[in-house]
Image: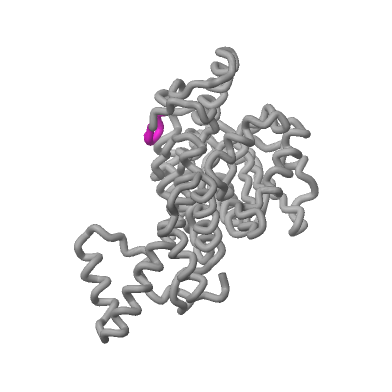
Amino acid sequence: MADPDTNITNLQNTYTHTQSYSYSIGIIGIGVLGTAIKETFETFEKLQNNQSSQNISSVISSIISYDKYKGIGTSILDVCKCDIIFLCLPTEYDNDKKEYDKSEIEHVFSDLAMYEYKGIIILKSTVEPQTTSLIYKNYKYAGLQIIHSPEFLSARTATDDFMNQKHIVLGYPEPHTHTHADTNTDTNTDTNTDTHTDTNTDTNTDTNTDTHTHTITYLTNFFSTYFPDAKISICSSDESESMKMFCNSFYATKIQFFTEMKLLCDKLNIDYNNVKDLMISNGWINPYHTQIPGHDGKLSFGGKCFPKDIKALSEVFKKMEISNEVLEAVIRENKMMRDDV
């Protein structure tokens, strides 16, 4: 694990010349991800308290956690006092509805709208493309500032993964009738202000653009401060949602492919690990997700994310009436090999 003191040192050396900020952080949902976020910013908070306050341009003023199912925190109203809320609710796959169960997310958004929350909501949950935009446009949630920011971490090393993340994706909601020009930049958000058209009036378009620009700039400053080595990508929430589902489904597919290669090698009495290493040595294949069996000693893929995400993505393809034979084949074979998914 990288030394967290390095992040604070980088913060002092790089951002002392910038405007001073004080951030209050709220976290809703204290599972694997919520706990990782909480522990990371608690670490930064402790480290900053050990530094000379005059050298720190940005500080964490408070961290408030809330999880009604685990009895953490007294009320969601406490979190509404925060500048930024990380929304880390699980989205299990609903076999009846053939989609993610987003009911808890919608319930929380309803509460935040009811209490007229004025800060920024960072939705960390995995959801289908267009979910954030549809929530943003729903009159029930009017006034909420929402950004979708997918997370990639392992349950076994969650806090370490979050603290040392190298890529942060910020997806802002936009109308679906858009002419979005993709931008992928480290810190410059100027090119993301006028890259989409709105079906509403010009006044509403200007207001939405200004809101997104302020939100993205604010979050860019925030994440650059505490994760100075991370690349920050700005995109639409449709794109950030797709990216998360596509990545996890690809990883699942990759594991299934290498599982088949492992079975063939075993049948032919060939050393799979040597073949795998030879393939990786070509430089075109990332070694991640090629270790068969995995850390659990089983073939194929399991865990909380890959099975549900590839199922949900396959259903999106079905609803759009697009061929999804590859995804379906992976799902079928996974069910044959694993009885725990």
Q: Work out whether residue 197 or residue 10 is closer to the camera in this orientation and state it.
A: 197
Relative image position of residue 69 (x, y in whole percent): 75, 57
Please say whether residue 136 is one of the residues in the magenta stretch: no
Residue 194, visible in the rendered structure: yes
Residue 162 visible (yes or no): no
Residue 250 figure quarter: bottom left
Please give the range of residues in magenta: 183-188
335 relative to 34, above or below: below
Classify 306 as above or below 211.
Answer: below
Q: Position of residue 214 (x, y in %)?
A: 54, 25
- Please identify the dominant SS of the magenta region: loop
Tell me where residue 63 appears, x and y as whole percent: 65, 45
Q: Nearer the viewer, residue 39 or 195?
A: 195
User: How many numbered badges does the structure rendering display?
Assistant: 0
Residue that appears at 56% across and 69% down: 341
Whether 39 is drawn above or below 110: the answer is: below
Which residue appears at 31% of the width and 85% of the height? 267
Residue at left offset 45%, top offset 48%: 322
| Horizontal side, residue 22 vs residue 188: left or right | right
Whether residue 319 is situated above or below residue 205 in the rendered picture? below
Q: How is the image coloured?
A: one colour
Q: Quadrant of the N terminus?
A: bottom left
Q: Residue at x 45, y 38 (%)?
A: 224
Counting from the top left corner in percent of width and height, residue 179 is at 43, 25
Left or right: residue 196 compared with residue 292: right
Asked whether 110 or 231 is in front, the reply is: 110
